[in-house]
Structure formats: C-alpha cells, structure tokens
Image (cartoon, rainbow, N blue to C red):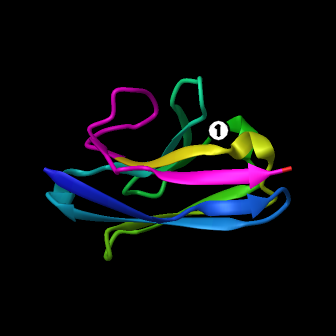
Amino acid sequence: QVQLVESGGGLVEAGGSLRLSCAASGSIFSINDMGWYRQAPGKQRELVASKSRGGTTRYADSVKGRFTISRDNAKNTVSLQMNSLKPEDTGVYYCAADRASMRSLPVDYWGQGTQVTVSS
C-alpha cells in the first residue's frame, strides 16, 4: 500500500500562484507515475499533470505553460507549481500515484484532496 499526503492549496485571486506538495510513504518502490488530478463541482475528475519515475511528464492542455510538476524520487515527493491561475482552475486537487501510468482512470492510489479556489 501507498499513502499520499497533500499540503498547500487555498484561496487566491486570478493571476496568482499556489504550490501543492505531496509526500508518499509505504510501498514506494512499486510506484511509477505520480502527479495530480482535479475535480471541479459537477465535472469529472481530470488529469492535471504527471511525472514518471524516469522523468516523463504529461500536462493537461489547459495548464501547459502555467503549471509545472516536479518530483524528487529520493524524498518520495511530488509538487505542482501553479502560476497565472484562472477561476476555471478551481476544484479539489488530488495527489495520485500509479504502478504504471496515471494517464487515465482508474488510478491505484489517491490522496485526500486539497481545495484550490481562484477568485475572479
């Protein structure tokens, strides 16, 4: 089993920045992909960004150029730097990890979620 604990999130004005962090513990050796999904009210959960153990990154088109994912394999952490935030970025952000790819659901492991609210 893998446990994921998120930190960060909160309320920010449009154009502002936030940083999310996630620490993994447990059977870390089994994990390949780590990253973030988000879910807005009334919408499906969507992939925001992911990074494989080997460094391959993937971003949703809507966040390219604004969000940056980073991963520290030695510390078992993944972070998401979010810049130029827009109201449509509002939602619950979930740290996620998968033994293979988290490109699509289902994903093996989830954090508890952290709220990000961007005011206009």
Image position, residue 106 (x, y; %): 34, 27
Q: Determine whether the residue tagged by mark 1 lies in a helix, strand or loop.
A: loop
* Residue at 18%, 59% in the rendered image: 29
Q: Which residues are magenta?
A: 97-119
Q: Residue at x 84, y 56 (%)?
A: 14
Q: Position of residue 12 (x, y in %)?
A: 74, 62
**What residue sits 76% from the left and 55% below the top?**
66
- Rendered view: 27 above or below 90: below
Q: Is residue 61 magenta?
A: no
Q: Quadrant of residue 40?
A: top right
In the image, taking residue 60 as reference, residue 36 lies left or right, namely left
Magenta stretch contains residue 101:
yes
Identify the residue under disc 1: 60
Judging depth in this view, the residue of 8 and 51 nearest the camera is 8
Q: Give percent across and percent down for residue 55.
A: 47, 58
Does any portion of residue 59 appear in the rendered image? yes
Left or right: 22, with 28 as reference point? right
Check disc 1 and give the amino acid type. Answer: Ala
Taking the spot 40% from the left edge, 57% from the top edge, the residue there is 54
Task: Count how many numbered circles sit on residues in the image.
Answer: 1
Residue 82 visible in this rendered orientation of the protein:
no
Q: Is residue 55 above or below residue 32?
A: below
Pointer 1: residues within 10 angstroms few (<14), some, or many (20+)?
few
